[in-house]
Structure formats: C-alpha cells, structure tokens
C-alpha cells in the first residue's frame, strides 16, 4: 500500500512512517518543518519505499499530486503544543482548519481514505470520566486562547464526519491523548520531554500549578499501532476513536518519577499558571480516556506503561545530547 503522511517529519508522523515502512509499505511525507524536523526522518531517507517533500500542505497542486499517488492518507500536519497554541492562536486556528479542509477536498476527488488526527483537548473541562467518544465536550470562553485548539480540531472532526456522511468519503478521526516518546521536543510546552531535559541538566523541574492535575501518557509506539490498525478497518469510517493510555499520574508524581529515574538532584519548582502561560489560563484537572471503542474495533490496548515510557524518553534525550 502507498501511504501519504502530512506532518510526517513531526514526532508522531515520523514514527508512523517508520512503522509503515517496517510493514513493507510505501510512504510519502509532506512537511513544512514548522514544528517537525528533518532529523526525525533522516534515517529513513535511504529506503527506496520512502520519499519526502519539504513544502506546505497548502500547496494545492503538490497536495493533489501526492493524494493521487496514495492509497491512504494520514493527516497529521497541525499546530500542536499548549505553549504554541497560547502564543500563536492565529497560526493554530488557520493551520488546523485550512489544511484539513484542503486535505479532505483533495481526498474527496480521488475517494481516498483519510485519517484525521484530533486530540483529547477536545474534551476540555469535562468531568465525565473516563472520556467516551460520545460524551459531551466542555470548553471555556473564546477570550481564552487555549480553547481555540480544541475548537479548531473539533471543526476538523465535524468536517471529517460531514465528508463521510454527505459525500461518502472514508474518514476516521483519532483523538490522541498526551502521546509521548523519543523525538518529542519540549519546545512547544509538552511536559514529559521538558521534565526529562530539566532533570538531566540538574535544573529545577517546573511543575505548573499545584501539580495535582493528572494526565495519562501514551507511548508513541502504541499510538502508531492504533493509527495503522484503525485504517485497515472499513467499519471505522465515519467514526471517532480515543487513542490513549489509561494509567493516570499527577504532574507532581510525574516530576518525582522523572527525577528518580534520571538519577537527578533537581529540585521541584512550583510555577503559577499565570507565569507559565498567561493570566487567566485554564488547565484540565484530569484527562482519562475510555478506550473500549478502539478495543472492540481492533483489540487495541496500550502496552507500554509509564515507567517504560519515561525510561525511553530519558535514554533518547541522553543519546541525542551525546
Ligand atoms: N506542565 C507542567 N510543567 C511544564 C509543562 C507542562 O507542569 O513544564 C503541566 C501542564 O500545565 C499540564 C500537564 O503538565 O497540566 C500536561 O501538559 P502538556 O502541555 O504536556 O499537555 P496538555 O495535557 O496540557 O495538553
């Protein structure tokens, strides 16, 4: 099979490309390197079944050609990371909505199945745990930039579902929950690579708020296995799937575990949210997925638990710093 991955030089995209190549598929990647990096795919460049184009998905003629040459499309190109979103809301909204519109439009012309990457951020402040795909979504006001990410991704979801229902396009939405692993950069605010780098450098580990907020961290290899499995099943078309680990950890506990695993002497520094982000910043106190829907579809379950995830990220950071 021939796969096209938009955002394929990014963290998740590069792991997906690697996994598809390992399964003997052909992979094309388009990435403008706005948050991705060529380092993520350099090791794939010699593979004759791999090719990459450094350009924006907004290049219609190029996108049309790439879609034409693909059997399945993974649309992962997006603005991600709370820091980036809070600092550059225009870029977030425009990138996330315009590019998805374009990918769906092009895919429709050729009737190519499309996976649209969405996010657990869509559940917002819901307290209906664990989060089910049919559960209500609870977002904050438009005056708070953070919510633009969830809203822009929800528009993507609505579009994907509408293309399926109205026009018969095979589309699938995956809501990824705090996906982490080697190659993820802390540059855009993600907590695990940030804590690991701080701990390895002996710098204070910056816990925002009181650290009692919790998350479930998914290893990228588990997420990629879900992405591949989902697109092999036509029953998935028109559906939304949670993709996430169910092992919950508070951010304070996470900081302590990172420090211990990295054999670090770092102290924990509590940073008020308004200093970390912006005055009035709203965080989610918990975020836990219900993954029974994807379990029923392909028997998927997360397999890599938090300690192993942290060890992988620590090992990778040590190697990449060496
Ligand atoms: N966080 C933190 N210190 C950091 C970065 C993030 O305490 O240096 C917290 C953040 O406030 C949130 C959690 O870690 O409660 C996860 O943040 P991330 O940006 O990785 O993902 P989110 O779940 O917010 O999308």
Image: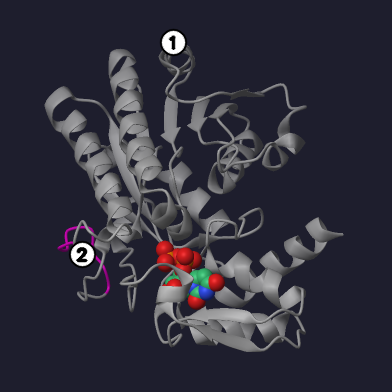
Q: Position of residue 48 (x, y in %)?
A: 72, 21
> Does 241 lie within the magenta span?
no
Image quadrant holding the C terminus, namely bottom right
> Does 135 lie within the magenta span?
yes
Q: Can you see residue 215?
A: no
Mark 2 C-beta to ligand 1 under 8 Å: no
Instruction: Tell me if residue 250 comes above or below residue 166 in the rendering.
Output: below
Q: Quadrant of residue 37?
A: top right
Q: Nearer the viewer, mark 2 or mark 1?
A: 2
Nearer-the-camera pick, 135 or 210: 210
Nearer-the-camera pick, 16 or 179: 179
Cα gap from disc 2 to disc 1, whole angstroms: 38 Å
Nearer-the-camera pick, 207 or 223: 207
Q: Residue at x 33, y 79 (%)?
A: 285
Which element carries disc 2, helix, strand or loop? loop
Q: Residue at x 61, y 87 (%)?
A: 268
Label 1, on which residue?
61
Q: Which residues are magenta?
A: 130-138
Q: Position of residue 118 (x, y in %)?
A: 35, 48
Q: Position of residue 153 (x, y in %)?
A: 30, 46
Label 2, on which residue?
140
Residue 168 - label: none
Q: Can you see residue 238?
A: yes
- Labels 2 & 1 near each other (Cβ < 8 A): no
Sequence order check: which comes first, mark 2 or mark 1? 1
Which element carries disc 1, helix, strand or loop? helix
């Amino acid at each position: 099979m021939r796969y096209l991955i938009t955002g394929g030089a990014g963290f998740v995209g590069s792991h997906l490309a690697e996994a598809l190549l390992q399964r003997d598929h052909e992979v094309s990647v388009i990435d403008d390197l706005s948050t991705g990096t060529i380092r993520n795919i350099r090791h794939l460049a010699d593979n004759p079944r791999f090719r990459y184009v450094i350009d924006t998905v907004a290049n219609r003629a190029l996108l049309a050609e790439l879609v034409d040459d693909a059997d399945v499309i993974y649309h992962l190109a997006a603005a991600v990371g709370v820091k980036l979103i809070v600092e550059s809301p225009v870029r977030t909204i425009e990138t996330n909505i315009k590019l998805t519109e374009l990918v769906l439009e092009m895919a429709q012309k050729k009737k190519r199945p499309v996976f649209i990457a969405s996010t657990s951020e869509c559940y917002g402040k819901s307290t209906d745990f664990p989060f089910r795909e049919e559960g209500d979504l609870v977002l904050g006001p438009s005056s708070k930039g953070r919510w633009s990410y969830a809203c822009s991704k929800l528009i993507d979801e609505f579009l994907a579902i509408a293309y399926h229902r109205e026009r018969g396009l095979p589309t699938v939405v995956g809501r990824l929950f705090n996906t982490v692993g080697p190659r993820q950069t802390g540059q855009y605010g993600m907590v695990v690579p940030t804590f690991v780098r701080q701990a390895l450098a002996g710098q204070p580990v910056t816990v925002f708020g009181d650290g009692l907020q919790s998350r479930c961290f998914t290893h990228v290899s588990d997420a990629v296995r879900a992405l591949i499995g989902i697109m092999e099943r036509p029953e998935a078309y028109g559906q939304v799937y949670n993709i996430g680990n169910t092992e919950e950890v508070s951010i304070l506990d996470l900081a302590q575990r990172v420090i211990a695993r990295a054999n670090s002497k770092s102290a924990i520094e509590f940073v008020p949210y308004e200093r970390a982000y912006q005055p009035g910043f709203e965080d989610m106190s918990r975020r836990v997925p219900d993954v029974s829907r994807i379990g029923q579809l392909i028997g998927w379950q997360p397999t890599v638990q938090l300690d192993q995830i942290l060890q992988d990220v620590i090992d990778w950071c040590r190697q990449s710093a060496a």
